[in-house]
Image (cartoon, rainbow, N blue to C red):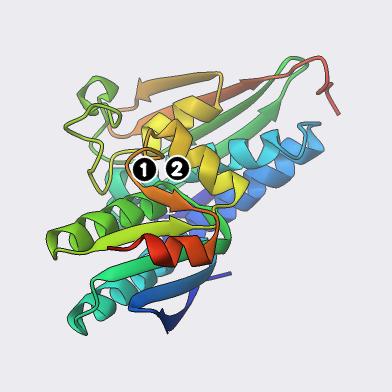
């Protein structure tokens, strides 16, 4: 299953609800395009809801890191919400768990943006 | 099995590995991790080894022994020296957008061996059985 993205605005934060697989090829490209689109529209606070992401590979992990860096370089913040156990474990293994700001409650995540 | 250097082949090898690992008696937590290691090895073979060349193929074999699962994946590329792969956990690399594939393979498998084929590279991925995962 390829990745799907839906976008919504909550109190000045752009929430991207992702579902499916973030893998080499379509999934990674879809995520990259979605983040670029948000930045191009002037939004700088992005919350990636990964609750329905069933699978992620090294390319997908790299894409999350690239998205984090792109948003930071644009003066914004990118945070992660609702990690599945699989994604959580992968971010632990790759020592990225401490790089990302990771939330498990959407309301608290929204209010955490500056 | 021999497959072309495409993303579809990566997905096919991943599925084949998960089915083979499950049939070989590995549990529902371990089989997906084996499949992920195979996916990463296949990505290396297709993308970095063969560079998506139509003229080059990827060869994979799956073997279940009494104490291990042994998977070999070979490409026809210029060869990969594992000593040249940067450590993705090093502070200077942690925010790189790539370079975690071999690291994940090593994280999920018990042994990973590289063999130069001139041309090409063969990766041998080995997962040992635990007492809870007897040979199927």
Q: Which labelled disc corresponds to residue A107? A: none
The location of residue B106, given as percent across then percent down, is: 46, 25
Residue at x 72% of width, y 40% of height: B20
Relative to residue B21, is residue A15 depicted above or below?
Answer: below
Task: Please tell me whether mark 2 sits on a helix, a strand or a loop.
Answer: helix
In this rendering, is residue A74 above or below B76? below
Mark carried by residue B44: 1
Tag 1–tag 2 contact (CB < 8 Å): yes
Q: Quadrant of residue A48?
A: bottom left
- Residue at the image position 35 percent from the left and 55 percent from the top: A64
Residue designated by label 2? B40
Query: What is the distance, in whole Å, between disc 1 and disc 2 at their CAs?
Result: 6 Å
In depth, the one of B14 and A90 nearer the eye is A90
Please say if B114 is above or below A70: above
- Tell me if B51 is positioned left or right of A100 in this view: left
Q: Quadrant of residue A94?
A: top left
Q: Vertical placement of A86 versus B113: above or below?
A: below
Chain assignment, label 2: B
């Amino acid at each position: 299953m390829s990745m799907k993205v839906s976008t919504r605005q909550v109190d000045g934060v752009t929430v991207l609800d992702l579902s499916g697989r973030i893998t080499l090829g379509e999934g990674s490209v879809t995520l990259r395009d979605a983040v670029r689109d948000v930045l191009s529209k002037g939004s700088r606070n992005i919350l990636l809801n990964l609750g329905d992401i069933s699978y992620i590979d090294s390319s997908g992990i790299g894409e999350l890191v690239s998205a984090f860096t792109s948003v930071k370089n644009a003066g914004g913040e990118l945070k992660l919400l609702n990690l599945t156990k699989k994604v959580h474990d992968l971010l632990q293994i790759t020592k990225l768990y401490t790089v990302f700001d990771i939330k498990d409650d959407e309301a608290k995540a929204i209010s955490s943006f500056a | 099995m021999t497959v072309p250097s495409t993303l579809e082949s990566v997905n096919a090898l991943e599925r084949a590995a998960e089915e083979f690992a499950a049939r070989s008696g590995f549990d529902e937590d371990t089989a997906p991790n084996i499949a992920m290691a195979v996916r990463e090895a296949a990505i290396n073979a297709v993308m970095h080894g063969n560079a998506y060349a139509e003229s080059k193929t990827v060869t994979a074999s799956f073997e279940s022994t009494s104490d291990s699962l042994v998977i070999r994946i070979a490409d026809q590329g210029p060869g990969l020296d594992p000593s040249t792969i940067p450590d993705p956990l090093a502070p200077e690399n942690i925010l790189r957008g790539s370079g975690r594939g071999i690291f994940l393979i090593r994280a999920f498998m018990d042994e990973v061996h590289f063999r130069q084929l001139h041309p090409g590279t063969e990766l041998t991925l080995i997962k040992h059985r635990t007492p809870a995962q007897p040979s199927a």
